[in-house]
Image (cartoon, rainbow, N blue to C red):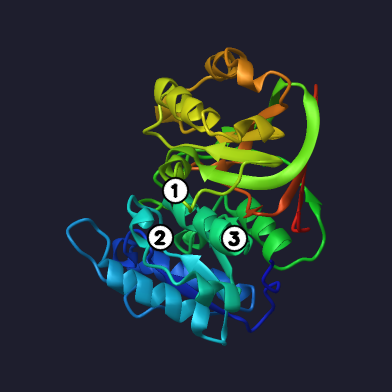
Amino acid sequence: MRAEKLKPRDEIRVISPSESLSIVAAENIEQAVRQLNKFGFEVTFSKHANERDDFDSSAIESRIEDLHAAFLDPLVKGILTSIGGFNCNQLLREIDYSIIKSNPKRLCGYSDITALSNAIYAKTGLITYSGPHFSTFAMRYGNDYTLEYFQKLMIEEKDFTIGHSEQWSDDLWFLDQENRTYEKNEGPYTINNGEAMGTIIGGNLCTLNLLQGTEYMPSLANSILFLEDDYESSPATFERDLQSLIHQSDFHKVNGIVIGRFQKASKMTRDLLTKIIKTKKELAGIPVIADVDFGHTSPLITFPIGGRAKIKAFETTEIIISEGLS
């Protein structure tokens, strides 16, 4: 199931299912609104978006009320999460999934939102989106690629091939927009050769793993896994989390893996990642592409959880994204 593409004058509702919008600086909220207005969207904020507790989040009841209200409002066509966090999975048992299934909207966010996005897809069949938070639209520089790929998926109708950004950043841009640090992007590389197609499942690996053994975990059968992790994921913890995913009963039906860019603090290198992949017999014969533009560095693509990907992993790589249903 796919919600309608976004159009000029559509209303975008900002909700805070993880951390509170109140942790985002006022000037960045204003900048994000201006950027979304440039697409022609009207931006509104959920009732409890700025509620904040001891965990920089809000009451489960408040977050559920805002999520349901956003899906029930006939004027709302797209939903953006304020920011990531740590506790989105608290909501999963409280959600009325019939509301979402009866009122499909385009929900977009990443990081901790992985739990919500994959759960919604598993419970309703609605395609959700791993892509920029509302706060991501506040980035003044180095964000054109992010905006381009958000538009390709959320507004335009065509399938598209992912091209890599010219440069990337892993800095605290939200604290200082004028003094940024950029790295040349060498582009994605192949770890395991091959080609495959399948349904896109994934997002933030350690958050996805929170769904294991629950009714909220999507099937991995005939999937292309899109996986990434943040600065807290060292090579050792990424390896452990990947192994946990491999232990899922239907992992043997995974068709391919696409890995996002690691943050510098993770200390992951191409050699270490290659060793991790090559030492796992379950991955033999599965094409694996790494260092793609998504994850906790900037810029990032938007991709559809429940959509389709076709990948070719050889000396050069190719990733084609489609919202065509399985």
Q: Amino acid at mark 1?
A: Thr
Q: Residue at x 70, y 72 (%)?
A: 5
Badge nearest the viewer, 3 or 1: 1
Badge nearest the viewer, 1 or 2: 1
Residue at which label 2 appears = 92
N-terminal of the pair, mark 3 or mark 1, is 3
Horizontal and vertical percent position of residue 104: 61, 74
Do residues under tags 1 and 2 come within 8 Å of each other at their CB atoms? yes
Q: CA distance from mark 3 to mark 2?
A: 15 Å
- Give the secondary structure at mark 3: strand
Horizontal and vertical percent position of residue 209: 45, 40
Residue at which label 1 appears = 214
Residue at which label 3 appears = 128
Q: Is residue 57 above or below residue 67?
A: above
N-terminal of the pair, mark 1 or mark 2, is 2
Residue 184 — which label? Answer: none
Horizontal and vertical percent position of residue 205: 48, 38
162 vs 54, left or right, is right
